[in-house]
Amino acid sequence: MGVGQDQQEPEVSTNGSLHTVPPLRRIVVGHEVPPIRVADEYGDAGAVQSPEEPLRLPEDQLGPEWYDECMRTESLSIRFGEKEAVKEVSLQVNAGQVLALIGPSGCGKTTLLRSMNKLVDLTPTARRTGRILLDGEDIDLFDDTQLRRRVGMLFQQPNPFPMSIFDNIAYGLRERGSKRPRKKELEPVVVDALERAGLWDEVGDNLDHPALSLSGGQQQRLCIARSLAVTPEVLLLDEPCSALDPISTAIIEETVVQLKDEMAIVIVTHNLQQAERVADQVAFMYLGDLVEYGSAVQIFNDPMAERTKDYVRGDFG
Amino acid sequence: MSTATTRKRKQAAVRRTRAAKPKKIKSKDSWSIGDRIGVGLAWFFGLMLCFIAAAIILYMAWKGISFINWEIISTSPEASLEQSKTGGFLDPIIGTLLLTIIGAAIATPVGVAVAIWLTEYGRPAPLARFVEAGIEIIVGAPSIVLAIFGLLVFQQGFFSPFSFTAEGGEVFGRSFFAAGAVMSLIALPFVVGGTREALNSIPRHVREASYALGKDQASTIRRVLLPSSRSGIATGSTLGMAQIAGDTAVVVVLLGASLQIAPEGDVPGLDVLKGTGSTLTSFVFQNSPAGEGNAPDKAYAAAFVLLSLVILLNLIVNRITRKGKQVWG
């Protein structure tokens, strides 16, 4: 990825919220060449459009390369038997930001998401090539269970376990063996997780009630709390609101936006409005390719690739 | 144009609209004669089955209740030529309960383990198919065949601790242990089936949610899958218990079908398990006109108790399945 330039340290300007656009460009696959609107610092002729006045962008339009990386994929390909679901995808996931993966059904966005905590490896036919790095370390070097504690996940369907609310959240914390933490030690963590997921006010009085007696939206927030309890660095959300009503969806979205300060969040969604509401960065995928990756503002208002344009406008999908 | 023709035309128009008014068509009107007969037979056999079931229960209740009394269910059977001194069937009741519990106690853990292996591991695939075929064979085998096989096994010297051993080292091979072990085979397919069904009904994403929290397969099974399958396991083993309670062949061949529970050895508790006995089924058989006892009234009373027990077990199954369903979104 990247169109030929060496990556430079982006020079952050001091004048208010305006920044010089960094030299690394986000990219577009296929023959659709993006219009060159950027000059690099050294005035590379090929890239220069107006060498005197380098383009400046407001903060909300800064692309992913501006932020601290938490996780990244490098030429990641995933195939199920003969079918290649994800093709040579390289992207970075930033700490403190929400990355939305969008694209039509079957474009590989969920597969990409599920590869980040190696859930995809549970499918016997899945073959993964390329690298995934978490804080610069290859995730294949971690134990699966270790990795999944650092990279949490929320599913399409709310899926609390058939036990009490308390036990659901404490589930991830309870270790095997003799050093089982007592209920008293777990309580502050459980309360904290419920508070951060915005569920404490509703269920605080009846932690011993069965989790499956909660409403769908509450169950989904319980699942968020369950993930938060193990303090993940990255939270993967796989269409977390597709089974929920609009009010529950709004609450979940609000929670997601609040949580991003503490972790990196990747959300797969079919709902473009949702992506626009919660995402800082957006990656558009099509048939396994990463077509375009940039700030949410740029992708939605000024997409470079034709495919992105069509999709964002709602012409297909 | 004359008024007469106009009127005629109007009348014709009215007639046409009347004719055009659609007749209500019943979907059955279009059914072929074969379909009608088929539906009729389905109704007939369905109702007939209800009728037969009701007849069995009512007849057994009528016969049973007229002969049943406290004495008959609280005294042990005695050998006597005089019918009034042959006692009741306390021992067979205890025998039935004991055998059912032994069988279920063996079948439940084994069956749950087999079901977990089949649904959660099940590899290599040929081995899984082989295991499934094995279960099918146990389901299909007549219990008398299982009983004879059990006798063959338990008469081996190796199994002498489980039954009466004669002076010369001959192993009798008949005991509550032996019968319970073979009975567990009869209950096993039900436990496996119930547990598998429950495990299969747990969506994949629930397992994945557990993995996504950094849990391995073992804790996922123990903490999530097994608790979720509780009702399926209970259903399976209760159905299995009903099968055990109703089986006769194994009792006759492997429990000795002795008149009374005959403890063997001198360890209290264990001696009963090592000894022989009888159950309600063998008691009914022997006291029916087909058996030696020839006391049909006692047979009816015992059959009624047995039927009540099995119906009770089935009601428990219904209750568990209705109450215990886990619902995931």
Image (cartoon, grey):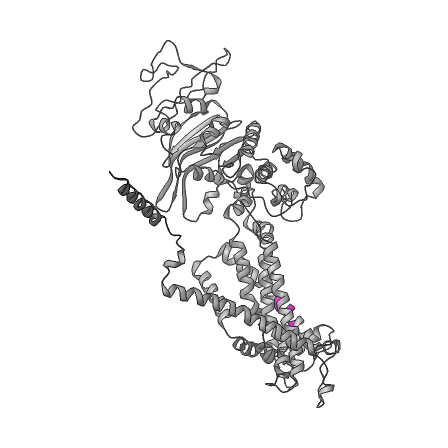
In the rendered image, the residue lying farthest to the top is A52
Residue B319 location in percent, x, y?
62, 58
Residue A45 visible at all:
yes
Residue A139 forms part of the magenta stretch: no
Residue occupying the point 70% across, 75% down? B272
Mark count: 0
Looking at the picture, tell me which residue is in the foreground, B71 or A18: B71
Vertical arrangement, residue B89 with respect to residue B198, above or below: below
Vertical arrangement, residue A100 with respect to residue B80, above or below: above
Residue A6 location in percent, x, y?
38, 22
In the rendered image, the residue lying farthest to the left is B1
Residue B211 location in percent, x, y?
54, 45
Quarter of the image that includes the C terminus of chain A: top left
Taking the image as shown, residue B69 lies to the left or right of residue B299, namely right
Residue B100 forms part of the magenta stretch: yes
- Extent of the magenta region: B99-105
Picture quadrant where residue B305 is located: bottom right
Residue A242 location in percent, x, y?
49, 37
By secondary structure, the bulk of the magenta-drawn segment is best described as helix
Quarter of the image that includes the N terminus of chain A: top left
Picture quadrant where residue A222 is located: top right
Vertical arrangement, residue A271 with respect to residue B250, above or below: above
